[in-house]
Image (cartoon, rainbow, N blue to C red):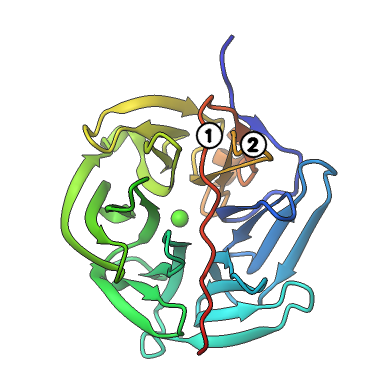
């Protein structure tokens, strides 16, 4: 039996990204960056929802106090999902109006990592930031072209990171105690004919699942060898990110985008912007939450 990714019957996104499973409510959330909203879907009931945030949103995570935390074009904010009310935490790039926040994720100790990118491409003037539970923001990596996938090894000794423009999946030594990163080096380089590496998640076996923007696929990599272990093809070119979800964390949810495609490409990819599900036979880990302390 061939294993395939199936399209889920939900409204398409312009730029679907950042899927996140919420175990306590059994829902998947993801962002539509250009649609400026958070999307929600309950796989059991089929119920869909959305919360508009009024500006581009790169990533959303759950906080330990039940709120959500977003990386918006204008910085880090708390969000009350019921009322849609935003409360700014910090805007580390208030002086860089040409940048916006992109992908982000919490590390196993509950710090929120999110990076930026220039809205119009060009020079690598983005950065990767770390928001700690006390509200302090630290710039951790500079000279980023398009900050994307993040993940941590099972033993928390390594952080994986993708700057899409480099075509590389990189890794750092990660200090779980203080959130420091060092010794950046490359896991693998994505070949030109397989698109660009975008979002990423780590499975229970410590392997990396990487979305291929302009590459029609999600691939599983062994970070110790750089070897591609599995390739899952999708009927859309702009595959953006993935996460594990479902009651048993055995479903890989995959987001995609239609933004920037020509009429002719869109006619060839009627599912562009859809959400997909794939059952890889390996499970993921529950997502880490933002560990709120007094600010
Ligand atoms: Ca992305």
- Asked if marks 2 and 1 touch (Cβ < 8 Å), the reply is yes
Q: Relative to 26, does residue 195 appear above or below in the rendering? A: above
Which residue carries the number 1 mark?
Answer: 283
Q: CA distance from mark 2 to mark 1?
A: 7 Å
Viewer-proximal residue among 72 and 283: 283
Q: Relative to 273, does residue 227 appear above or below in the rendering? A: above
Q: Residue at x 56, y 65 (%)?
A: 61
Which residue carries the number 2 mark?
Answer: 248
Q: Quadrant of the N terminus?
A: top right
Q: Residue at x 40, y 49 (%)?
A: 198
Q: Residue at x 23, y 40 (%)?
A: 189
SS of the residue under disc 1: loop
The image quadrant that residue 126 belongs to is: bottom left
Q: Relative to 112, does residue 76 appear above or below in the rendering? A: below
Q: Is residue 170 left or right of residue 265?
A: left
Q: Is residue 269 left or right of residue 238?
A: right
Q: Residue at x 52, y 69 (%)?
A: 290
x%, y% of residue 106? Answer: 46, 63
Badge 2 or badge 1: first in the primary sequence: 2
x%, y% of residue 181? Answer: 23, 64
């Amino acid at each position: 039996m061939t294993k395939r990714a199936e399209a889920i019957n939900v409204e398409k996104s312009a730029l679907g990204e950042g899927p996140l499973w919420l175990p306590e409510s059994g829902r998947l959330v993801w962002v539509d960056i250009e649609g400026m909203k958070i999307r929600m879907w309950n796989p059991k009931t089929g119920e869909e929802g959305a919360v508009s945030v009024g500006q581009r949103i790169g990533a959303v995570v759950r906080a330990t106090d039940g709120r959500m935390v977003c990386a918006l074009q204008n910085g880090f904010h708390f969000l009350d999902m019921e009322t849609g009310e935003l409360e700014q935490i910090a805007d580390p790039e208030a002086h860089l109006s040409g940048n916006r926040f992109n992908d982000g994720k919490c590390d196993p100790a509950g710090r929120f990592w999110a990076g930026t990118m220039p809205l119009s491409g060009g020079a690598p003037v983005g950065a990767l930031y770390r928001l700690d539970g006390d509200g302090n923001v630290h710039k951790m990596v500079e000279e980023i072209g398009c900050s994307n996938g993040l993940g941590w090894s099972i033993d928390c000794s390594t952080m994986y990171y993708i700057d899409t423009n480099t075509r590389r999946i990189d890794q750092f030594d990660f200090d779980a105690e203080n959130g420091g990163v060092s010794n950046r080096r490359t896991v693998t380089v994505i070949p030109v004919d397989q698109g660009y590496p975008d979002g990423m998640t780590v499975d229970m076996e410590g392997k990396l699942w990487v979305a291929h923007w302009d590459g029609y696929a999600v691939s599983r990599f062994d970070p110790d060898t750089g070897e591609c272990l599995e390739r899952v093809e999708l009927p859309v070119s702009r595959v953006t990110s993935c996460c594990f979800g479902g009651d048993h964390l055995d479903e890989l949810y995959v987001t995609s985008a239609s933004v920037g495609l020509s009429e002719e490409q869109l006619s060839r990819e009627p599912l562009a912007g859809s959400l997909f599900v794939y059952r890889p036979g390996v499970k993921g880990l529950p997502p880490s939450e933002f560990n709120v302390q007094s600010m």
